[in-house]
């Protein structure tokens, strides 16, 4: 059974990878305790994006991204993060990370028999948008 959901921007049906993509975007852009029925869902990324770009803050960002995606209860079961690389860094407070990982189309069902490599480019700023692309496309 393919994973499905509703596109938060258009209201149209999402199936497969686009649904996983939206899930990762929501997890990383949501502050903890801000969703009424899902107060436990989210990450520390929004709280870190406006802090000074010190080595300590960057390490905390890496950790927050990993912890949010790989959280056993509220993370993304369809995406297994394998690496994080910072690809943009600047005084304006904007960071961009490239995530490499494995997408499991049936991971939400506990079935990890089908695996596809994926790459995600994540800008982290007050107007952050998550853009995910397929490796090799």
Image (cartoon, rainbow, N blue to C red):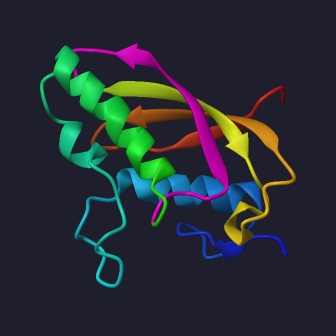
Residue at left 28%, top 24%? 59
Task: Give the residue furthest to the bottom.
Answer: 37
Q: Position of residue 73 (x, y in %)?
A: 46, 66
86 to 37, vertically: above or below:
above
Look at the image and tell me whether residue 93 can be seen.
no
Instruction: State the residue in front, 82 or 44.
Output: 82
Instruction: State the residue in front, 114 or 54.
Output: 114
> What span is in magenta?
74-93
Quarter of the view holding residue 4: bottom right
Q: Position of residue 84 (x, y in %)?
A: 50, 26
Does residue 21 belong to the magenta stretch?
A: no
Task: Give the residue furthest to the left.
Answer: 52
113 left or right of 73 in image: right
Placement of the C terminus among the 4 image quadrants: top right
Does residue 76 belong to the magenta stretch?
A: yes
Q: Position of residue 124 (x, y in %)?
A: 36, 35
Residue at left 30%, top 33%? 61
98 left or right of 125 in image: right
Residue at left 16%, top 17%? 54
135 left or right of 54 in image: right
Quarter of the view holding residue 133: top right
98 left or right of 40 in image: right
89 to 81, vertically: above or below:
above
């Amino acid at each position: 059974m393919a994973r499905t959901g509703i596109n938060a921007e258009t209201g149209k049906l999402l199936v497969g990878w686009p649904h996983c993509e939206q899930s990762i975007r929501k997890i990383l852009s949501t502050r903890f305790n801000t969703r009424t029925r899902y107060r436990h869902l989210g990450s520390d990324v929004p709280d870190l994006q406006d802090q000074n770009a010190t080595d300590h803050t960057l390490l905390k960002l890496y950790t927050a991204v990993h912890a949010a995606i790989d959280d056993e209860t509220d993370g993304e079961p369809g995406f297994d993060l394998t690496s994080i690389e910072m690809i943009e860094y600047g005084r304006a407070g904007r960071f961009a990370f490239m995530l490499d990982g494995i997408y499991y189309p049936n991971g939400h069902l506990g079935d990890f028999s089908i695996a596809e490599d994926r790459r995600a480019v994540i800008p982290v700023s007050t107007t952050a948008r998550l853009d995910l692309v397929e490796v090799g496309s």
